[in-house]
Image (cartoon, rainbow, N blue to C red):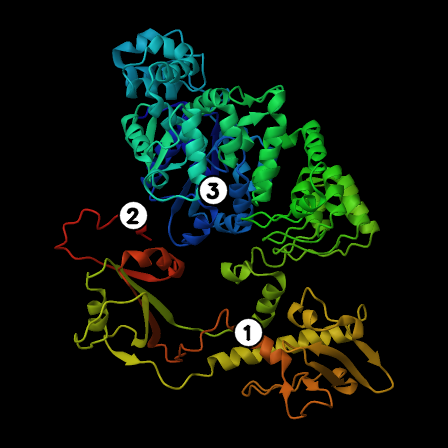
Amino acid sequence: MFIKTTAAEHVLKCIKENSCVTITGSSGVGKTATLRHIALQMTEEGYDVLLVTEPSDIVKFYNPTQKVLFVVDDLCGNVAVNLRDFQSMELNMDDIKYILENKKTKIIAACRLQVYQDEKFESLSVFNSCVCNLQSENMRLSKTEKQSIAKLYLKTKASEIADCHDLYDAFPLLCKLCHDNPKLDIKNFFQNPFSVYETEIDKLLKNGYYTKYCALALCVMFNNKLKEEILTEDVNEETRTIIENTFEACRLDRGTSRLSLLYELDSLMHIFIKKELNMYQILHDKIFDFFAKIYGQKIMLCLIKNADSGLIKERFLLERKDGMDQFITIIPTKYHQMYIQRMIDDWSKGKLQDVFSNINMKIPVFRQKFLCYLKTLDMSHQRQLAHTCDDNYKDTVLLRCCFIGDSSLIRWCLIHDANINQSRCDGVTPLIAACHKGHTETVSLLVQNNADLDKCSKDGLTPLFAAKGQGHTEIVKLLLENKAKIFDRRDDSSKDDRIPIAIRKMEPWSIELYLKTLKSGSEKRRDLTLVVVGKKGAGKTSLVRRLFGEELTNLESTNGIEIHRRQCKIKSDQWTKKADKDSDFNKRILESVVEQLYLNEKEQILSESSPGMLDKNIYPNIAESLDEEEIVIDDKVDVIYGKIADDNDVIYERVVDKDEVNNDRIESSRQEIDISVPVLVQETDQPSNEIMQTSEQIASKELSAFSDTDVVLKDDEDFTTLTLWDFAGDEEFYATHQTFLNPDAVYILVANLNDKDKDNANHEHGM
């Protein structure tokens, strides 16, 4: 059921005119309903609609030839910014920007107002480009629209709430809840919905329905993500203890059967509970706000000690503050130390993001109190905490402190020998974080402690350009005064259409090598990937045999994945087996890469700015091997030499004649792989006939990323190389198959039409 509103019409107009639209507003104002309505409208415009939960799915399912609308609900969290979701979005932001340049691709997202207003959200520029706030003057529900919604849901009872239309922003949600639960006193519910739910919870306790009371408490305990398997299957000791402690707090025996909770949850279905993907949840986020507040007051100690770390970071404050969410629970002073100890426990378990994104950590007074408590711990424990990394994104404690910009916590980290240059999984260092956030005092402190001023992230962002991009001129000046290099490797390739997305996600030097090698020319490879999928016994293997004209004898079910390669004549039913002799396609690529590597090396040796040294940014594999301090130019012996250690710690000496270095002519052959390149010659105590061709070996490794030596190149345009993947149909393989799915492949879905199983097309294991 949906009433067309002015806001919905405006959002539809915006998504037609823009590549990305963000719908925002508080819980219950109709964001999700509007999102779904607009998605349905866009199907009439010829768009395929894809609901995504991970930013990487946008990149994964991007199709440049198809009109696609990606739909994202609860963008980056539903109470506060979920750092895991936020950082995942940041990691994919460049790719998403690139994708949206294709006018056929659009994104529409719904985001809670408090999440959108968080300062972190500013960096997600794509989702700030066109914002529709459903609570703004020009989009909020009119009196007529509210009356229409009330009549739709409440029928003849709509008149009972005529004077309640403006009491709450969540008017559409309240109407729906009354429709779904006819037993509610409509007038009383609209006047104070929180007190209605509080009264219902009190009734459960008063009438001795402790198991129902406990079932709802567990939904809060697990932060509205109570998996069915927790109540039906074996669980670890920690989870068992949490459940038993909740039993005790809810006046149940610790030995109560978990299955009894399952029965009570089912009895509360559609009243308080819903079930999605084998997970029990409170009906709506707004109602969960109520329940978190109610149980936060009733079983506070049990929640502090046992609740999910996500609930701990979002739902409790030690001190009341202006503008705080009315459903946040204030912790009495006598429990402050217990709460801080719980945060330390989460820290010890590697949950750094939950600890340092805790809403209390935004308050300087709390951070000071938190640090004072830290210093009371045993020194060995403090050191262990200072060196802990986050389980998911490998954030360090120092990095998290630099995002916050707390100098006292940063000094504490440095006192305990935290690695000042250690980066997280995307290459962001503490200095980059501080520069991006504009924390001048923090940057100065890191510089004084010898932070690497030029270490860049995986996408090539340096501290200098992190500060410059955010307009932090004072930090830019500070870095330049301390001799920070002026270079930014992100601009070279982020929007180059010649570079595939897979290559653009590599480190900057690999992108540079790809572009330089591309200048030597290109060749066509006519490849086709065909993927055969279906349930076990559907006949996939038989179909593959028939495609290749083979006998249907001795058939066995596929185990895992079987891969077949054939030469296929275009526009014909003729097949040929893969030739035994490999073509020289890969050899020609290898020649080009080796030549480029040699040119890079030669440029570095002759460089006036750093004679005899290799630029780590352009040529890291060689630069990491060379001991740069031992590389010198010796005019007396007319050689350039340095020492290199291989995996067996055998030292080799690299010798290059200076006349050869100064020779502009590169002795190489387009037809032969034996290109003249600098070689590593063993020292005199090693056999002289063992020669390591460094550049060629490095090139061979790099080629493995984009060249398959098993596939034959046919210069004849009548032929293409077919790679056929036969996926096993056993359920235990489903989870692994998605790893091998390719958006450029052709898929054949094989089904047994005699199978009446209604779950044949079940999307849970689909592509």
Sooner in the amino-acid sequence: mark 1 or mark 3: 3
Q: Residue at label 3?
A: 19
Residue 701's disc is: 1
Residue 351 rendering spot, x and y as whole percentages: 56, 42
Q: Quadrant of the N terminus?
A: top left
Are the residues at dot 1 and dot 2 in contact (C-beta closer than 8 Å)? no
Q: Residues within 10 Å of mark 3 (few under 14, many from 20)?
A: many
In the rendered image, the vertical position of residue 158 relative to residue 690, given as above or below: above
Name the mark nearer the viewer: 3 or 2: 2
Marked residue nearer the N-terminal end (1 or 2): 1
The disc placed on residue 66 is none
For residue 278, side relative to residue 351 (left or right):
left
Residue 763's label in the rendered image is: 2
The residue depicted at 74 percent of the width and 90 percent of the height is: 684
Estimate the x, y position of residue 518 in percent, counting from the top left.
56, 70
The amino acid beneath tag 1 is: Lys
Camera-nearest label, 1 or 3: 1
Visible residue check, residue 29:
no
Residue lying at 64% horizontally and 93% vertically, measured from the top left: 689
